[in-house]
Amino acid sequence: MEATVIDLQRVGGEAELLAYDLDGIVEKAYFITTAPVRGFERIVKGKNPVFAVNAVMRICGICHAAHGIASAEAIEDAMGVSPPANGRYLRETIGLLNKIQSHLMHLVMIIPDLIPEPERMKYIVATLNILNKINDVLTKIGGSPTHPPYLVIGGVSRVPDEKTLVNLLEELDKLIEEYIVLRRSFKTSISSSDIYGQLRFKKHKPKYLASHMFYGDKYSIRIDKIRVVRYEDIHEDLPSKARENTSMIALYDGQIVETGPRARLNKYYDYSDDSLWGLQEARLIEIELFLKRTRELLEKVEVGESGHSKVLVYRSGKGTGVFEAPRGTLIHTVELDDNGRISKYKIIVPTMFNIPLIEQAAQGFPSKHVDIVPRIYDPCIPCSTHIIRLDSR
Amino acid sequence: MSGKTSILIYDLGGCEGCPLSIMRSYPRLARIYDVHAKCIGNADIERQYNYAIITGPICLNSQRHIEELKKIRKNSKILIAYGSCASVGGIILYARGGQEPRPDHRVYAPISKIVRVDFSIPGCPPAPQMLISLLGCIRSGRGYFLDLFKAVSAYSKLSGFDLMDEVVLTGICVGCGACVLSCPTNALHMVDGRPDLIVEKCIRCGTCTVRCPRFTQILIQRYKLRERAKMLASLVGGE
Amino acid sequence: MAFQPATIDPSNPLGPYIGAYIARSTAKNVKAGGGGAVTAILLYLLDKKKIDGVVAAKKTRGIKGEIVLAKTREEILMAAGNRWSIVPYTMRLKETLMSTDIRRVAFVGLPCQAQFLRQMKMFPLMEGDFADKIFVIISLFCMGTFAVESFTDYLARNYNVPLEEVENIDIEGDYLVIFYSGKKLRLPIESIIYHVQHGCILCPDYTGVFADISAGRASREGYTLILTRNRLADSIVNNAAYDGYLEISEATEEEIRYAREKALDKLNRSLKYIMRIL
């Protein structure tokens, strides 16, 4: 067996794939994240919860809003406050737009594998066009396309006015059409691609974990069944190269589970596709669903009503926030001390569930193109490298 | 390759927000420059570049990243620290390490602590069109704002706290409101005609300081003094 | 590429400019500080649909004011007049600009605000910036602004001038003239220097070198001196004159020297004080 280290590009963050090759087929693979561990759970310790929401959003520039929402949910749970209806609608909207952003950015990164020049640039430009429009929508609702500042504890700090809402609805209608056209032509363009064939061919059937189609529901999963372990704990005879890994692994009920778009669609929507391509297909379907749902939510927003609870309670407490991030179930848990400051903070991110699956799926894949496997799983390394070990039982 | 100016966009362990923000203007950028980035799949730190745009902070405990950074500095003519983490430390200055699985990653700093930086651009993250505008300005020569971004590279921290200490509390704030419109977390608000910092919201991105007319003046003047002092020191044979 | 002044240096205290004019409004009802030229330019831009609105300071009480987005002729006329205090930009302004269908706006402000707006336009450091909405930046000449409470209290205590009744403030030679309740109060400038904001004493910029158009008092009574700093600005001023909003003539050497001296005064004052706080 011959070992090669592939520096992974076009994924969110710094990572390498250590692949052992046997006759052109991957025999065993290790997914090694190399980004340094910034330690956000430690950063927020001792701080005011308001700081925590702004800080954890900056764990990741891809799923910023997802972290913001999960964090706000957890802190609200601990404080005993809850957002008003407008706050819930707008928060979900911000979360959905974030998921669309992430899926589109991922599409930009995966296009070069599937579409050759000169068509490639055309698709990248078209995708970025839609992405930029989505960003404009998010700017109007969340205040900024990255790290939206209107996400606060207790809801969303600003409600758009009537005129803006009407404009946004029109904009969304156009976006839905534009996206459907792009998706259709994208699918015809890739059908002859070599890699597309390989992704279709490679089947892999994991267990799924999802808590909600659009938002996140802490009561639909058993958080006590999640265990976070070190990377070394799931591998025997780890090669020394792989010991540099900087992320943790999460297991559900002691098992490896997949979380993310396919898991969501499988659980809450009539969808099943066990091929690796099925993951990407799920993302393409989700974008459309999310755009439509965003439209629905914005129609519900009551102009003139407040978007947040306007109260912060500084007291001791424990709370959990679960949100469906672009890559799957994201869990934040917080403990507040007597002054309402943060004494404990834990984050479990979807990529921690998915890393073992990336390695499993890479086995048996042609070595030449194996870098597509992590890419199709869309790991988010900035997120996965900032996580503490939960007390293992 | 083509005769285009080459640029490298490289992240050293930040949140990826900055490179993705740059990527959004990729079609425009690619028309003028030969762009190399991980998001495109052609990043290679072994070759030479005209410009290197570094995002993300440097972990002072990670040999791997420090070596990468030094290599990029050697291979590039102009190095730009892009975004708050790379330029002034940003949120990540709060890092105190101790986190699994690598509790040894304890201290983070802006990249100017390790290598010489030509321009430092705060912002969390800067807007997509920022980079195109900046590279155009660098090409066409000097200017007040370029002097400013050069001066920022001499700092290892700038934040709302510095704005309060140096401008507001010292009484030289005129109350123009520039900082309030420059805060990405709405941590600054006007109280009786003066900005006040909501401390728990400040993420130390430094945007307010480089937008304040008074603070920019101070930054540039101090930088000039520092350069002069350096020159004098070199004349008498010191470091 | 927008222009960018290298620095504000003593050899060129007015900053770079391509045109210098002496101007006044042709309309009788426009009577702001100097010749009302800025108001005339704004009305021209609005009438010709080149802008959707103007961000300017509107007088509320005495010398106090608030930032408004003026969208009609009437609102612009209401916001005209000399400003002797700085009115801060606030989050509310940003929200107004973000949430409505305003596409292009003219900003009228002081040199410090012009610097901020220019930086936002050239180097958007934030994704939430409204850089693309800034159509033109107009800076008013500024020798410094008053610390509002301090100054109004001084007037009330020593001269019995109530805040509400201050109608206008003007400079005549070395004297500051305060118009209130139909009366005039003349004060030597040295006597009120303590009520100028400290930050303004450090400021090196008299005309607003970062603006597209700088405008302010001309040496000739009842006229405005206009400096245009790029082609866009120059065409705006010339077209406004062509369409009859503005009466312009090239500024003479002497008139430019007048502004230059004032600018140099402010710059020297700044250089003297900045060293103390570094």
Image (cartoon, coloured by chain):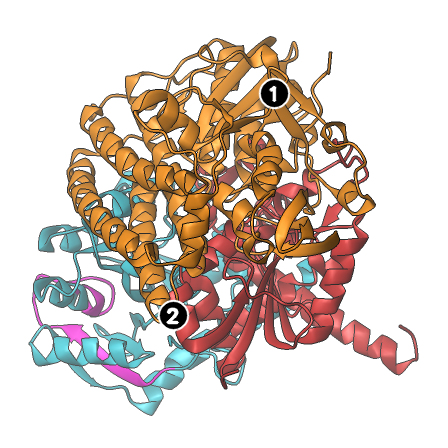
Dot 1 amino acid type? Gln
Q: Is residue B124 visible?
A: no
Q: Note whether A44 is above or below B147 in the view shown.
A: above
| Cα separation between marks 2 and 1 | 42 Å
Q: Amino acid at mark 2?
A: Glu
Residue C88 in the image: above or below residue A322: below
Chain coloured red: B
| Relative image position of residue B50 (x, y in whole percent) | 59, 78
Q: Secondary structure at mark 2?
A: loop
Please tell me which residue is depicted at 34% across the width and 56% down the height of the picture: A190
The colour with which the image depicts chain A is orange
Name the residue located 79 percent from the left edge and 38 percent from the top edge: A238
The label number, if any, that marks residue A255 in the structure image: 1
Q: Earlier in the sequence, mark 2 or mark 1?
A: 2
Q: Chain of mark 2?
A: A
Residue located at (45% from left, 58% from top): A113
Q: Position of residue A78 (x, y in %)?
A: 54, 11
Give the chain ID for the cyan colour: C
- Is residue C35 part of the magenta span, yes or no? yes
Secondary structure beneath disc 1? loop
Of residues C127 and C225, the one drawn nearer to the viewer in this rendering: C127
Name the residue carrying label 2: A117
Which residue range is magenta in the image?
C17-39
Residue A174 in view here: yes
